[in-house]
Amino acid sequence: MSLPGADKKIAAGVLGILLGAFGIHKFVLGYTKEGIIMLLVTVLTFGFGGALMGLIGLIEGILYLTKTDEEFVATYVTAKKGWF
């Protein structure tokens, strides 16, 4: 039996790695404010800020995928840790 919220781990991790600059992984986790920040930084800097946002997304995606389901749910679903 899987934990509620653990089903978002793979999607958020892969999206963080592939599309991290756009903050799509944040929207999957329900972090609208953080997702909008990442998206706006990328768009409003004409993509130049996307390098930094992409790096953040890559790191977060790897963190999501390397955590156990229990750690992921406790950190990102229950505690709502928005960054790293």
Image (cartoon, grey):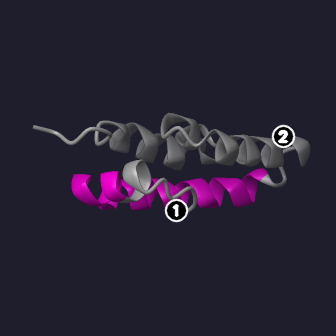
Residue 68 seen:
no
Q: Secondary structure at mark 2?
A: helix
Label whose residue precedes the other's in the sequence (2 or 1): 2
How far apart are the two marked residues, 2 and 1, measured between alpha carbons? 20 Å
Q: Which residue is mark 1?
A: 59
Q: Residue 36, percent across and down?
A: 73, 40
Q: Residue 13, percent across and down?
A: 42, 47
* Side of 14 relative to 74 (left or right): right
Q: Residue 54, percent across and down?
A: 65, 53
Answer above or below: position of 64 versus 30.
below
Q: Which residue is mark 2?
A: 43
Residue situated in front as seen by the camera: 10 or 17: 10
Residue situated in front as seen by the camera: 80 or 24: 80
Is residue 55 part of the magenta span, yes or no? yes
* Side of 12 relative to 27 (left or right): left
Crowdedness near tag 2: few (<14), some (14–19) or many (≥20) residues, C-alpha within 10 Å: some
Residue 1 seen:
yes
* Side of 17 relative to 45 (left or right): left
Q: Residue at x 64, y 39 (%)?
A: 32
Crowdedness near tag 1: few (<14), some (14–19) or many (≥20) residues, C-alpha within 10 Å: some
Farthest residue, direction left: 1
Residue situated in front as seen by the camera: 83 or 45: 83
Report the magenta stretch's main SS.
Answer: helix
Q: Residue at x 43, y 57 (%)?
A: 79
- Quadrant for the N terminus in the image: top left
